[in-house]
Image: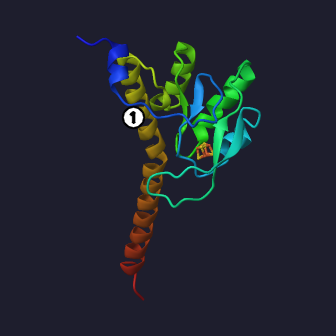
């Protein structure tokens, strides 16, 4: 029977961009649209390099690509890194470390899928948390629909009352 770590090894993990410094956090290779979110949330931890390599399906030219230039060391930097992960568009900042606290923080904000080393239990918790957060995000939309529906119903009832009101 395969244990958790063997299962993880069997899954092809995203490749880090070569410009990343060694460390637990990395930017995935080839996924950059220059959203600039990490540069806003964690300017000390991320840099931008010019990438002259050709990616499959893309014409040959230079691209800008962000990368981790400094691993977070202080609590404040760790917060900044997690904030950057939370707000990036393409979810290309990943965590390959095994610090349970960081993994749980990422799971809590619905970003458990950026962790390369989750156990089966953590993966299940991550899936459940993401589902819950998705449901919660959807709620305001339904509330808006409900309000719109009740407003339209009120208008319609007023129109009916006006039509059936006393005639002179
Ligand atoms: S987070 Fe992703 S898309 Fe945004 S700048 Fe970095 S690599 Fe590019």
* Residue 32 percent coordinates (x, y): 57, 48
In which image quadrant can residue 25 be found? top right
Relative depth, front residue between 5 and 37? 5
70 horizontally vs 168: left or right: right
Label 1: which secondary element? helix
165 horizontally vs 49: left or right: left
**Image quarter (top left, top right, bottom left or bottom right) of the N terminus:** top left
* Residue 124 percent coordinates (x, y): 36, 23
Relative depth, front residue between 11 and 39? 11
Relative depth, front residue between 123 and 8? 8
Marks counted in the figure total 1
**Image quarter (top left, top right, bottom left or bottom right) of the C terminus:** bottom left
Name the quadrant where ligand 1 sits.
Answer: top right
Q: Is residue 168 above or below residue 6?
A: below
Q: Is residue 85 above or below residue 162?
A: above
Q: What residue is rendered at 39% in x and 23% in y?
A: 123
8 horizontally vs 80: left or right: left
Q: Residues within 10 Å of mark 1 (few under 14, many from 20)?
A: few
Q: What residue is rendered at 40% in x and 85% in y?
A: 167
In which image quadrant can residue 156 be found? bottom left
Look at mark 1 in the image and give the residue it sits on. 131
* Badge 1 residue CB within 8 Å of ligand 1: no
Q: What residue is rendered at 63% in x and 24% in y?
A: 22
């Amino acid at each position: 029977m395969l244990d958790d770590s063997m299962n993880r090894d069997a899954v092809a993990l995203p490749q880090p961009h070569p410009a990343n410094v060694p460390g637990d956090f990395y930017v995935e290779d080839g996924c950059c649209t220059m959203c600039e979110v990490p540069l806003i949330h964690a300017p000390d931890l991320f840099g931008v390099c010019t990438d002259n390599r050709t990616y499959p399906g893309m014409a040959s030219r230079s691209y800008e690509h962000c990368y981790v230039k400094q691993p977070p060391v202080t609590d404040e930097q760790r917060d900044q890194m997690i904030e950057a992960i939370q707000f990036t568009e393409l979810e290309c900042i990943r965590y390959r470390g095994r610090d349970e606290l960081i993994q749980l923080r990422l799971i809590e904000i619905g970003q458990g899928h950026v962790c390369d080393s989750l156990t089966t239990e953590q993966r299940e918790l991550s899936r459940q948390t993401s589902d819950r957060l998705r449901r919660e995000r959807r709620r305001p939309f339904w509330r808006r629909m409900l309000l719109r529906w009740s407003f339209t119903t009120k208008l319609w009832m007023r129109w009916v009352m006006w039509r059936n009101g006393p005639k002179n």
